[in-house]
Each structure stands twice: as structure tokens, then as C-alpha cells.
């Protein structure tokens, strides 16, 4: 097998240089962002705040009733001149470029006062009123916002900022707007110039410390690490050797401690390799034995389907999926005689090899009793006493069992349940439902136990599904149980499926539910359909 080409790796020295460059760039960016933020904040405080304050002061001071008279009549008086002087004073104090008062209309605005025009030229002058300027002004005039601002930054080198505030009449209705306007260089250009100057200062002041830091780092860190790397390659290249590989590093810090630890690791690694070889050989031996045990266990369960190809009265299918290499669940089905079919499903406590051995013993004993003609309850009573006599394992093992013997000619049967899951039954014209009744205790708990029997009768088209607790107790990653409700939903989604298809549907339902969660318990199932003596497989 050809090895994939190794990716080209960066030298540690190159990484150190790139790291220092990255730190320097980060510092520059951080400083520039801080300066930009602070500059904008100061600009807002010193310009926007002043403009808003003076605009609001003017709007509060001007008489809206007289303003309306000037606008409508086109005549002035002493108050008009006083207000013009007042606006000029505010313009001067706030270092504004212009203050003006106007009455907005649909497509134009009519000026009442304008500090940049004479009294005669200001009153009644008109100009276009549209675009974003109109939108910003009318937002304030209509009362949607207490104050607004319009920024005209179409010029590359200058911007114009206009603040608005409404003037009200005595009834509280807006009649005009005060606008304060100032111009200034583009904020962006100022920020760029200032940041470029900052960048030059930071770079010049950082180069010498960075060079000094790099030289010391190279001598005290990079070169020792390079020697450690060479020693590691030498050690890996000859793991069988008893020769001690020493980097011979004397830096007086943690890197020297790392060199000492490397030498100690060299000794311990070779000892570990020797022990690992022994452990691997032992694990391979145990794995081979587990695989053999799994094969032996699988051989004990019926696995050829169709199991009875010459019998038309029924169809049966079963499966067992262990949680470990070998499991404690088992199933069995066989003809007691030509007219009686026995079905068994069981779950031994515990897992692994002990459960597997106890499972094989239990299966053989149960089959022998049923083959001898014992009823389900009698078979369980005798098997229980036999297991108790030899069950000296601590903690004591037990097995839950559901078994039934069905008379194929009539559909009548007898079942016994020793602490096992409730079976699921579907009548020909119905849905799958749990058959619930009181259980008997599990087998191999106490000597002399008596086990209840339950008579039942199947009609052509009836279906039976039995399972171990690994089905209902399958858990997803949120520790939720699959449960019997979900099981019944899966079964009833395809009510007329064949026994083999039924088990496949349930398996798919469990897998979709548990997702990535690990299988905790063995999962064993039997599906059975009864057709009757005429063997009508078209019943649905």
C-alpha cells in the first residue's frame, strides 16, 4: 500500500516570525479601531451635540405666531431684526456655517430668516425641497422624531451636516423649521491620515523589541526544540534498540525539564512496547475464543428460513442481535409433534460469556421438557428446579421466559410467561395490541415455584410478535426509552407485513430512534403469522 504524500509543514522558525507579525498587525488594528471610535465619538460630541442644542434653543425662542405673519405678509418689523441678530449670535457661538428658518411645502421651502443673507434677500426666498434632505426635515416637522440630522457627503473632501428642530404656534402645531448647518473635512479622510501616522509610529517603535525577542526565543526555545525533534526521530527510527537517546539540552528552564522527561520516556516506552506485545497476543487469543463462542451460540439458534417450507399453516421468523460479542438472549421454535409448534423467547440476566453459557443450558433444558410432552407451566417448573440445583454463581443468575405451544390444526394454544415482556397480538381484522396479564416470577430464582398458564386461540390471519426487553428499553442519546408505544406504532404502520418484514421494520424503527447511541442490551424478536389448515397466505 502506497503512503499518502505528507503535507508540506512550516518550520517552527517561520511560524514564530509569522506569529510576531500577526501580533504586530493585531496591535495596529486594535489601536486604529480605538482611535477611530474615539475620534467619531468626539466629533459627535463637539459638532452634532452643539448643532442640536443651538437649533433647539432657536426653535424655543422664536414666536411661531409672528413667524407665520412674516411668511404670509412678506413684511418685517423690529422683532424680525432681533431674531435675525439672535440667530447670527448662535451661529457665531456654535461656529456654525449657517442658520436659517424655513416653512416647508410639498416641493419647495420658503425662507423666513437666513444668517447668510440680508433681511431683504432672506424673507420669502425659495429653493427646491426634495430627496433625503426633505425626508430628514419632514420626519422632525411631522413629529416622528424630536430631532433629526441630514448629512450630505457627496463631496469627496467636504461634508455638510444639517440639524433640524420644529417651531410651534400657540396651539402646539408645527409652523416652521430651524436648521443649523456646518461644514467640515471628511471624517474618513481625517481618520485615514491619523491612522497612517499611528501605523508608522507603532511599526518603528516595535521593530527593535521584536528583533531582540526573536533572537532570544530562537536561542532559548527554537533551537532546543529542534534538537528534541531530531532525538525523537532517532528514537522512533530504532525502537528495538536499548540505546538511550539524549537531546543534551541545558537551558535551565522548562525545556530542559522536557528534555529530561524525554529521556525517561525513552526508557519507559521500550518497556511499554515489550508489555504491549504480550498484551496484544493475549487479546488476540481472547478475541479468537470470543468469536468461537459467538459462532457456537449462533449455531444453537434456528437460523434457516423459511424454517418449515413444507408447512402452510404458519410462517415464522426470528433474530437475535447481541449487545456484546455474545449475549444472554435466546429464541427457539420447533415441532413437538406433527400438529404442535413450540415457540420460546428468553432473556438471561447479565451479559457476556456467563450469560451465554447460562442461556445455552436454559435453552436445552426447556426444549427437552417440551419435547418430552410437558405443558408450558410444567416445563418451566422442572427447568426452574434443575437450574436452582446447579446455579451457584454469585450474584445468582435467572432467566425471563415466554413460551407457548400451539395446536396447528385448531389454532388453540397454551402460553406461560415467567417475568418476560408482554406479547403483542394482531387479529386478522385489527391492529397490533399488547396482551397484558400477570406474570409468573423469572426462572431460577426460588426452588418449587409454580408458573401460570394462559390459554389462547389464533384465527387465520392472526399475527403474533414477541420480544426481549432490549427492544422496549433501547435508548437514544437523550436517554429516552423506545417503549411499547413506539413499538406498536411501528408495527401498525405496516400491519400486514410478513414476519421477516415485521422484524426488519422494528429494527429500522429502533435504529432511527437511538441514532448514535450505543446498544445497551441484546435485541431478540420472533414474528409469527397463523394461516390455518388451508394455508391461505393471501389473508390480510
Image: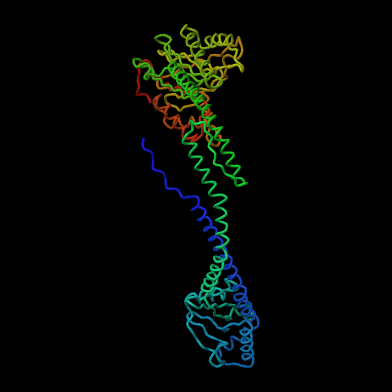
User: Looking at the image, which is closer to me, 449 or 71?
Assistant: 449
Vertical order, 398 against 172 (above or below): above
State the image quarter where residue 311 is shown: top left
State the image quarter where residue 120 is shown: bottom right
Q: Residue furthest top?
A: 372
Quadrant placement of the C terminus? top left
Q: Residue 117, image x and y in percent?
A: 55, 90
Q: Residue 133, image x and y in percent?
A: 50, 76
Q: Residue 435, image x and y in percent?
A: 51, 23
State the image quarter where residue 112 is shown: bottom right
Residue drawn 40% across and 22% down?
Answer: 461
User: Looking at the image, which is closer to me, 149 or 315?
Assistant: 149
Picture mark count: 0
User: Looking at the image, which is closer to me, 31 or 264?
Assistant: 264
Q: Residue 325, image x and y in percent?
A: 48, 23
Vertical order, 434 against 151 (above or below): above
Quadrant placement of the N terminus? top left
User: Looking at the image, which is closer to me, 282 or 15?
Assistant: 15
Amino acid at each position: 500500500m502506497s503512503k499518502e504524500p505528507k503535507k508540506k509543514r512550516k518550520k517552527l522558525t517561520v511560524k514564530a516570525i509569522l506569529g510576531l507579525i500577526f501580533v504586530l498587525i493585531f496591535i495596529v488594528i486594535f489601536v486604529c479601531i480605538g482611535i477611530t471610535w474615539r475620534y467619531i465619538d468626539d466629533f459627535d460630541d463637539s459638532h452634532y451635540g452643539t448643532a442640536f442644542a443651538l437649533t433647539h434653543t432657536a426653535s424655543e425662542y422664536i414666536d411661531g405666531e409672528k413667524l407665520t405673519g412674516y411668511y404670509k405678509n412678506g413684511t418685517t418689523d423690529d422683532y424680525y431684526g432681533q431674531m435675525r441678530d439672535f440667530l447670527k449670535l448662535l451661529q457665531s457661538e456654535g461656529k456654525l456655517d449657517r442658520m436659517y428658518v424655513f416653512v416647508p411645502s410639498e416641493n419647495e421651502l420658503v425662507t423666513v430668516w437666513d444668517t447668510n443673507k440680508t433681511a431683504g434677500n432672506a424673507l420669502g426666498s425659495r429653493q427646491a425641497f426634495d430627496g433625503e434632505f426633505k425626508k430628514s426635515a419632514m420626519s422632525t416637522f411631522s413629529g416622528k422624531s424630536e430631532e433629526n440630522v441630514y448629512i450630505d457627503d457627496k463631496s469627496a473632501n467636504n461634508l455638510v451636516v444639517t440639524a433640524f428642530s420644529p417651531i410651534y404656534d400657540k396651539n402646539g402645531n408645527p409652523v416652521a423649521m430651524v436648521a443649523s448647518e456646518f461644514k467640515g473635512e471628511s471624517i474618513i479622510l481625517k481618520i485615514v491620515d491619523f491612522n497612517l501616522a499611528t501605523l508608522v509610529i507603532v511599526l518603528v517603535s516595535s521593530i527593535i523589541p521584536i528583533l531582540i525577542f526573536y533572537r532570544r526565543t530562537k536561542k532559548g526555545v527554537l533551537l532546543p526544540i529542534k534538537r528534541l525533534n531530531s532525538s525523537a526521530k532517532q528514537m522512533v527510527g530504532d525502537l528495538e534498540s536499548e540505546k538511550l537517546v539524549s537531546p543534551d539540552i541545558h537551558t535551565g528552564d522548562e525545556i530542559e525539564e522536557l528534555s529530561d522527561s524525554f529521556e525517561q520516556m525513552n526508557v519507559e516506552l521500550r518497556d511499554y512496547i515489550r508489555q504491549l506485545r504480550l498484551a496484544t497476543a493475549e487479546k488476540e487469543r481472547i478475541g479468537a475464543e470470543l468469536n468461537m463462542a459467538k459462532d457456537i451460540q449462533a449455531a444453537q439458534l434456528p437460523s434457516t428460513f423459511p424454517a418449515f417450507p413444507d408447512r402452510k399453516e404458519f410462517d415464522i421468523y426470528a433474530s437475535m442481535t447481541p449487545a456484546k460479542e455474545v449475549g444472554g438472549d435466546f429464541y427457539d421454535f420447533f415441532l413437538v409433534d406433527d400438529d404442535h409448534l413450540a415457540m420460546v423467547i428468553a432473556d438471561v440476566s447479565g451479559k457476556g460469556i456467563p450469560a451465554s453459557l447460562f442461556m445455552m443450558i436454559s435453552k436445552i433444558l426447556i426444549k427437552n421438557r417440551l419435547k418430552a410432552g410437558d405443558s408450558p407451566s410444567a416445563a418451566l417448573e422442572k427447568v426452574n428446579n434443575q437450574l436452582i440445583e446447579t446455579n451457584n454463581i454469585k450474584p445468582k443468575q435467572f432467566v425471563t421466559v415466554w413460551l407457548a405451544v400451539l395446536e396447528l390444526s385448531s389454532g388453540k394454544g397454551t402460553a406461560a410467561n415467567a417475568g418476560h415482556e408482554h406479547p403483542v397480538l394482531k387479529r386478522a381484522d385489527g391492529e397490533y395490541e399488547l396482551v397484558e396479564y400477570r406474570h409468573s416470577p423469572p426462572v431460577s430464582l426460588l426452588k418449587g415455584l409454580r408458573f401460570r398458564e394462559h390459554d389462547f386461540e389464533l384465527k387465520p390471519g392472526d399475527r403474533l410478535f414477541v420480544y426481549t426487553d432490549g427492544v422496549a428499553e433501547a435508548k437514544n442519546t437523550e436517554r429516552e426509552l423506545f417503549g411499547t408505544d413506539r413499538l406498536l406504532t411501528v408495527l401498525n404502520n405496516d400491519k400486514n407485513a410478513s414476519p421477516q418484514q415485521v422484524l426488519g421494520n422494528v429494527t429500522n424503527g429502533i435504529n432511527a430512534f437511538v441514532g448514535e447511541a450505543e446498544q445497551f442490551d441484546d435485541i431478540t424478536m420472533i414474528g409469527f403469522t397463523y394461516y390455518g389448515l388451508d394455508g391461505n397466505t393471501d389473508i390480510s
